[in-house]
Image (cartoon, rainbow, N blue to C red):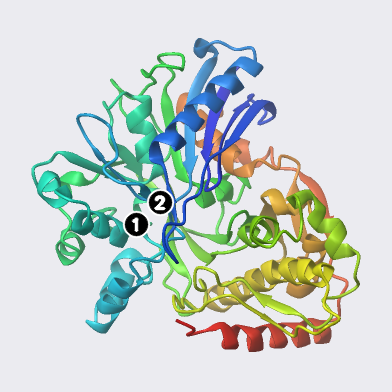
Amino acid sequence: MKAVLALDQGTTSSRAIVFDERGAVIARAQQEFAQFFPEPGWVEHDAEEIWRSQRDVAAEAIRLAQLAGADIKAIGITNQRETTVLWNRKTGVPVAPAIVWQDRRTAAYCAELVAAGHADTIRHKTGLVIDAYFSGTKLKWLLDHVPMARECAERGELAFGTIDSWLIYKLTTGKVHATDASNASRTLLFDINTGDWDDALLTLMDIPRSVLPKIVSSSGLIDKIDGQTSCDGLPKGMPIAGIAGDQQAALFGQGCHSPGLAKNTYGTGCFMLMNTGTTPVPSNHKLLTTVAWRIGNETHYALEGSVFIAGAAVQWLRDGLGVINNASEMAALAGSVTDTGGVVFVPAFAGLGTPYWDASARGAMLGLTRGTTRAHIARATLEAIAFQSADVFAAMQADTGIDLLELRVDGGATANELLMQFQSDILGIPVVCPAVSETTALGAAYLAGLAVGVWQSQAEIAATWQVARRWEPTMSRDEAATRLARWKMAVDRAKGWV
C-alpha cells in the first residue's frame, strides 16, 4: 500500500488523515484545542498545545490505519495560515502565545502604514492589502512587546513561523526551519514577483531576516538530510514532502489545477480561491493575489477572497448565546422557519474581510422584532455565510471577467443542505461538493505524494476528482438581487463601528 499522512492543523482543531493511493481515507483522528480571548479583538493559541494535539492525532491515525511508519511514504502539512509563532531556536519554547489570524491587535499599526502611503507598494510586492489579518504585523508586535524578544531576535536566537513552520521544527526536533511559498505569501514580507523575502519590507516593519524560515517548494522533500520525523511520539524517518496553507491545499485537493477553476471552503471563516495560472493577477476589487503553490521551479497563483467569520458565527450561537447545544442542531433549527423574519445578521466580530477590508466594523443584527425567535437568528446566521461568500464571488468575476460555471465547495458546513441550497440560489450557479470532502487534507497529501511518486502527475490527481452532491439554483434572479441589496444595507450599518 502507498499511504500518505496529511496533518491538517486548523483554527479550532488538529486533524490527521491517512490516504491511500486512490485518495481514499484509510483512517483519521481529530482533537480540539483551547481558544483564548485575553482582550477584545485579541485571539491566541497555545502553540505547545497545538503541537501536542497534532502529534497525538497523527500517531492515532497511523494506529487506526494499522500501519507502521515505514508504510507512510510521505507527510503533507496544511495549516491555519497567518497565525504567528515566535520561539527560541535552542529550546523550542515559544516566547509568547501564538497570535491567531483572527486577531486584530495590530489594526492601529496597519492604519499607520496606510496613512504613511505604503499601501500601493505593499500591494504591488505582496499582492495583499495592509491588514492585521496577516502575520508580518503580528511578528512585529511580538518583537516590540515581548521582553527581550527583539534583542534575542537580532542575535539570531529566535525563530518565526506560521503553524507549518512550527510543526516542521517540532517534527524534526529543531533541525529544519522552513515554510513553503504559499504560506510565505501570507506574511506581508514576501514578494510574489521575486519569490523571496523582501528586504525593504523587512526594514519597514523592523524585522530581522534571521528570524525567517527558508522557503521551499510546496511539493518536495523539505530537506534531503533532515526533512523527516525524528521527534518522540511518532515513528522516525517519515519524510515531510508537502506543505501548503489550508486554502491553497483545498484548491489543489479540489482539482482546481487549471486557470479559471474556483473553490470555496466553509470553515471557521470562508475562503474562495480561483486559480489564475503562472502569472499573478492584480485585483481592482480588493481581492488578494496570492501564491497557490510552487512545484519545482513553477509557481501557480490565485485570487482569494477572505470571509473572517463563517462557522465561527455558529460557534458563537452555541458557546456565546446558548441558542444551540451543538452545531448539528443548526440545520433543523434554521429549517424550522421559512425565512429569517426580516432579520439580517452581519457577523463582523473581527472586522470585515473581502471586499470591504474594514477592521473597524463589528457584528450587527438588524430587523429584530418581538416575533424574532432563535430559529430566525439561526437561519440569518446561515444566510450571512452565503451572503459574505457572494460578495467575494462578485469581486472575483469582476476582476477576471470570467463567468464561473460552478463553484466547488468543501468544509464542514457543506453538510448543511439549507446553506448550500441558499448559496446556489444567491449565486445563480450550481454548487458542487466532491466525493472526498476532506479536500484540505487531501490537497496536502497530493502535494506530498506527488513529490515521492505516489502520484505521477497533476493530471492523474485531477482525474480522481468526482462529484458527490450538486445544488442547482431555484431562486429568481430578481429575488436574489433584492436579498443581496438588503444584505449590503446591513453591512453599511456595521462598518466603522470602532
Q: Amino acid at mark 2?
A: Thr
The N terminus sits in image quarter: top right
Q: Position of residue 358 (x, y in %)?
A: 46, 78
- Give above or below for 467 relative to 167: below
Does residue 454 appear in the picture of this structure?
no
Q: Amino acid at mark 1?
A: Ser
Q: Residue at x 46, y 60 (%)?
A: 102
- Disc number placed over residue 34 in the picture, else none: none
Q: Secondary structure at mark 2?
A: loop
Q: Quadrant of residue 197?
A: bottom left
Labelled pair 2, 1 in contact (Cβ < 8 Å): yes
The C terminus sits in image quarter: bottom left
Q: How many marks?
A: 2
Does residue 489 appear in the picture of this structure?
yes
- Give above or below for 166 relative to 477: above
Callout 1 crowding tier (Cα within 10 Å): few <14, some 14–19, many ≥20:
many
Q: Position of residue 93 (x, y in %)?
A: 28, 34
Counting residues from the start of the chain, the first of labels 2 and 1 encountered is: 2
| Image side of residue 291 versus residue 67, left or right | left
Q: Position of residue 376 (x, y in %)?
A: 82, 72
- Disc number placed over residue 83 in the picture, else none: 2
- Disc number placed over residue 135 in the picture, else none: 1
